Image: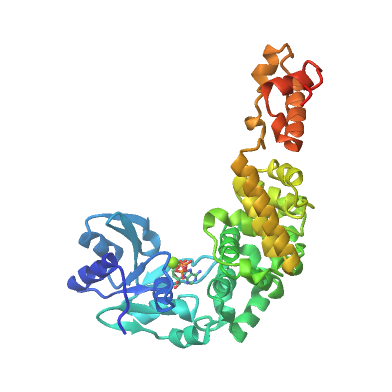
Amino acid sequence: MTMKIPEAVECIISRLNENGYEAFAVGGCVRDTILCRSPEDWDITTSAKPEQVKEIFPRTVDTGIQHGTVTVVMNRTGYEVTTYRIDGEYEDGRHPKSVSYTSVLKEDLRRRDFTINAMAYSHKTGIVDEFKGMDDLKKQVIRCVGDPIERFTEDALRILRAIRFSAQLNFTIEAQTFKAITVIAPNMAKVSKERIQTELTKLLISSHPEKISLVYETGISPYISSHFHQVPYEKAVKLNGRENGFLPEGKKYLRWAMFLRFAGEEQAVLVLKDLKMDNDTICKARTLVKWWDYPVKAEEESVRLLMSKMEPELFDDLLQLKMLSAYGRQITDYCKEIALIRDLIRDRGDCLYLRDLSVTGKDLIEAGIKPGKEIGDILEKMLSAVLQQPKRNTKEELLNKFVYNKAPAAE
Ligand code: ATP
Ligand code: MG
């Protein structure tokens, strides 16, 4: 079987071979290529030691030299080239105390987490599959290489990786591997919150975010955080399938909001803070959780009011979230109607935010209002009036009504 690999990867492998070393593409990139998915990154494994790799290639970066990894830069892209490695004893349930090099590819494949991630490939040799990864790809299962209890004890992050891959690939977790997860669950406490967050985010933005329920069903949720454990996940994962699909990383707040939408605003924020989520994501997810179920009516004034609560992109996300949660034609039709009204409001350019108001703070000061809280209060009142009736957004009418207390001119 010949696999398509990027030119640069082929070039790195050939150069290593020419210098007398073995080299293969390995891990996730081999798995994804066989599955006809596009790999995130290409990793290369080689019998060459890091120093030898550095002698061969002019441009390298010592990214993880202590674990045998050198990044080779080619066409402005970095490729991680790692020496065949055996991990020493694991000391904290996360990291090996030491690593040692080996000249045997099979030993390097043995330290990898799952059979589907333990295959190597080169044009010269074809696929190297020492642990029946191909069979498991066909069966669509995630199975540890070797004894799952041992493998999860060595590194508890693998527990979350198993669940995350099962969401990304829509695979099931093989029975022994699943059982081991339930046994080793308490070790999850040893994994840093940032790493947990990264894995859960990958899971949520995949095409099967509903698989987050595995985090609860395997019993690891209490070891993630107590707020996380209390999330009403069963309701949250009942999704309208048609609206599913892979989302870009930049939209992660949308899937987090989806998962947390029944938890309420406060708990949602606590969960995200526990997981050391960045503030921008917390803020957006919070807004969506707060408003996703707001009883907006399919009429302009009501839609404008809701639109004014958030930035335009977030409002579109909110509609998507509503659709995702929608059951039955009626709700779907209702969401579509809201979307049409939204388009109308946008096409007309109705004022939705203070920044669109035809009166500014400066205008109010010029009209004799003292700088201070009153300015903000008046602007808010003006905005609220304009949200009801967009036509009122003229400087004259607003100043007359809210500053000079004059009745609006008769129409
Ligand atoms: P993706 O890049 O899509 O997230 P991946 O399988 O490529 O998935 P990486 O984190 O890029 O995952 O790791 C590359 C390879 O390194 C894996 O395929 C696996 O063989 C090995 N690996 C990564 N993390 C671990 C781990 N915690 N334990 C054992 N092997 C691991
Ligand atoms: Mg990868």
Seen in the image, is 53 located left or right of residue 370? left
Which quarter of the rendered picture does the N terminus lie within? Answer: bottom left
Which quarter of the rendered picture does the C terminus lie within? Answer: top right
Farthest residue toward the front?
Answer: 411
Figure disc tally: 0
Query: Residue 195, relative to residue 302: is it above or below?
Result: below
Seen in the image, is 219 located left or right of residue 40? right
At which x and y percent is residue 213? 68, 71
The residue positioned 70% from the left and 58% from the top of the image is 335
The residue positioned 73% from the left and 11% from the top of the image is 368
Q: Nearer the viewer, residue 136 or 251?
A: 251
The residue positioned 68% from the left and 62% from the top of the image is 323
Query: Residue 212, relative to residue 299: is it above or below?
Result: below
Q: Nearer the viewer, residue 164 or 378?
A: 378
Tell me where residue 84 sits by quadrant: bottom left
At which x and y percent is residue 313? 59, 48
Tell me where residue 192 sits by quadrant: bottom right
